[in-house]
Image (cartoon, rainbow, N blue to C red):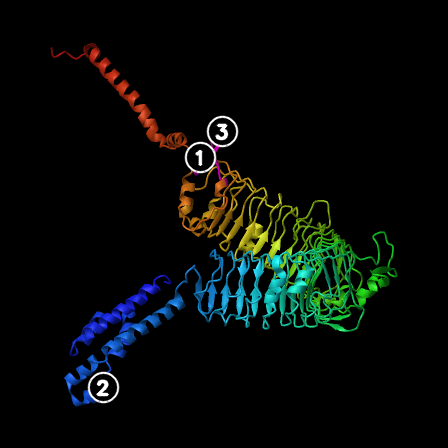
Amino acid sequence: MLLATESVIRGYLIICVTLFAVSHEPGDGGVSVALALLKTPLAETSLLICLRFSFSPDANAVSSGSTKSAAAEMEAPLPGLFLLLVLLAAGWGSGALAAWATFPGGCELVQNTVDCTGRWLSSVPGNLRGDTEELLLDDNTIHVLGNVSLLMYHQLRRLSLTKNRLELIEPGAFLSSQGLHVLSLADNLLFTNYSLTAAALSALPSLRTLDLAGNRLTEDMVSVLVWNLSSLESLSVARNIIMRLDSSVFTNLTQLLELNLEKNYIFEIDQAFEGLQRLQRLNVAYNYLPCVVEFGLTQLKLLNVSNNVIEWFLALESDDLFELEVLDLSHNRLLFFPVLPRQSKLHTLLLKDNEMSFYQRLPNGTSLANVTVQFLLIDGNSTNITTVSLWDEICHSNLSSLRLLDMSQNQVWYLPEGFLAQMPSLTHLKLNQNCLETFHLSEGDPLAMLTELDLSQNQLEELGAEAGTRDILPNLQLFNLSTNRLQVLPPEVFTYTRKIATVDLSRNRVDLCPQPAIAGKVESPPCVDIRGVETLTHLSLAGCGLQGLGGHPFQGTSLVYLDLSDNHQALSGNLEWLQDLALTLRVLSLRNTSLSSTAVDFSAFNSLVRLDLSGNSLTVFPTSMGALELRSLDLRDNCLPALPTDVARTPLGKSLREVYLSRNPYNCCTLGWWDALQRVEGLHIPDGQEVTCIYTSRTLSPRALPEPVLRSCRWQTADLALLYLVLALPTCLTLLVAFAVIFLMLKEKLLKMVKSRCGVSSSY
């Protein structure tokens, strides 16, 4: 479309010129001819322009009825009108070309944005529109931005020059573009001439956003570059070689709202942000900070110090209200729970992947409730000692607005009493991958707002609950208890979680109720009862060691997702105990459940869309599956020699969009089903390259069987009755001929013998 624009405009001009030539003839014939010639939508626009300037007879001449006078008056200005038309068409055409076509060099225009990304340009194009507001020059080879590079672009507001190996911006480069608001210079070589580049940047009084990431800048270079940029609101100096920050680096950035310092080599920060009174978002992730002490940036809303080597975090002892809302301390070496501001608006606290624990008491029973820790702060010749009571300081922090707490991947083996009581607004609690041995639930618990609780991958042996408790976690929707040591849960624990939708009990030694009675035992073994939990939709029981399920363990539920994989003794040859889910179940995993019976009937599960039967011992494809309308089927790691030859024509074959088939001993001579599946439109076989078949003792790919194998397979799969007939026909013919010859040779003797025995006289 863009490339054809110029030729279309030239066509308009030719049509207009032709129209003038035709319409110049006396009379109205010219007009009618022109109208007859121009019937296309493109020509109609030219026609209107041409008619507007061609047929404007004088009103008095028309009223007098003098045709000759009118014609004469029209002929007189014709050369002038013709020239005017040519100029108009040329001007209109160039405007349309600028609006739609690509510029020389391959740049593309979208409204007031010119995109010259990846065009191998060595300089800024000088033939772009003067009213360009955004210019994208990323991924080019512009090494120098000269004084005249942007001279034509007075209305430029956004300029991007990332990944250009830019070494120098001359001091006068931005003098004609002082309205620039956003400037991206990331991934260049500005360290080489940073002082001259700083002089160029100082000519931008309206600059709001500056990206200097990936330029090998030191802290001194950064200080020089941003010294006169008092209008900056967002600055990124990520991926440089900054090591130490002090108060001199960002002195004049009084309007700064956002600062990105991630992926540098920062190991010390000494009052570098004290003058940034409007700073709200600070990112110092992926550096080498050993600690954060006397944190007092009350105006800050987001602080990201993740992926450092921080061992402790101490906020300033003050009753001032901190605006802090998000604090990310994940992936550090925290030994203690951070000492947070006493008053804050904190709603997200991320502490994942640290070495944190609580020390009010030790595993051997020793109490450390009154133990304090002293932090020695050495600053030059002065030494300050900060004494902290590890537990009391936590109690003094106001966490009433906290909604998300992530303490996963730590060394927490217990939660101090009253720890969660400070967090009445908590909705998401992640304690997975710790060392918890118990977790206690009680009625009226401050976790009434909790919607997600993750206790997976701990050492839980008991989930405690007070007797008679009837209001446990009323708003809980997701409960992850996987990979623990649980054998039983509190009675009716899921009955009173009125909104529970997802439960993961995988990798625990639990059984489902009801359990069959065991001879000689009065009490049934402990079990988990989920019957009647109407809100439950997703349940995972993988690797729980379930024993011969029976009865109706899912009665009263509406499960759509059920994972029973890695339970070798769970199935007893039929799926009757799953019948209560026949109308709702959509995803079922029976992976590695020792399923081998061909009598397993899936026909009742009409709602299934995904079925996993991998890792079993199926030797025959279950015929009942042909009627299902699955979208995903996994048959890997079974003992299937073939699939039904008509599988592609069944409802299953027509609905499948994904099927896994590898690691089965398919017969290379019965691959008709494979060819049929290859022709099914929209069907994807992700492991198709791994599918193999067996011919004698060889393992081959069904995608490229050798010709000798194909010929041999044709003989093996031929109609045996026809083969036997072909083989027997020569033998039968030979016997028939032999019988005829013998009969002819013994004909007279046989006749005499017959006559003598029958006593009939011979006719001769």
Circle 2 residues within 10 Å: few <14, some 14–19, many ≥20: few
Residue at 48%, 49% (x, y): give it: 658
Q: Would you name the residue on which mark 1 appears?
A: 668
Q: Secondary structure at mark 2?
A: loop
Observer-nearest of 71 and 310: 71
In percent of width and height, residue 576 lies at 56, 50
Spot occupied by residue 308 in the image (x, y as percentages of width and height): 71, 56
Query: Which region is colored magenta?
Result: 690-703
Disc ID at residue 42: none
Callout 1 amino acid: Cys
Q: Which residue is mark 3?
A: 697
Structural distance between the alpha carbons of marks 2 and 3: 101 Å
Location of residue 616 (image quadrant): top right
- Residue on which the image places disc 2: 58
Say whether residue 130 is left or right of residue 273.
Answer: left
Query: Seen in the image, is 438 located left or right of residue 602?
Result: right
Residue 321 visible in the snapshot: yes
SS for callout 3? loop
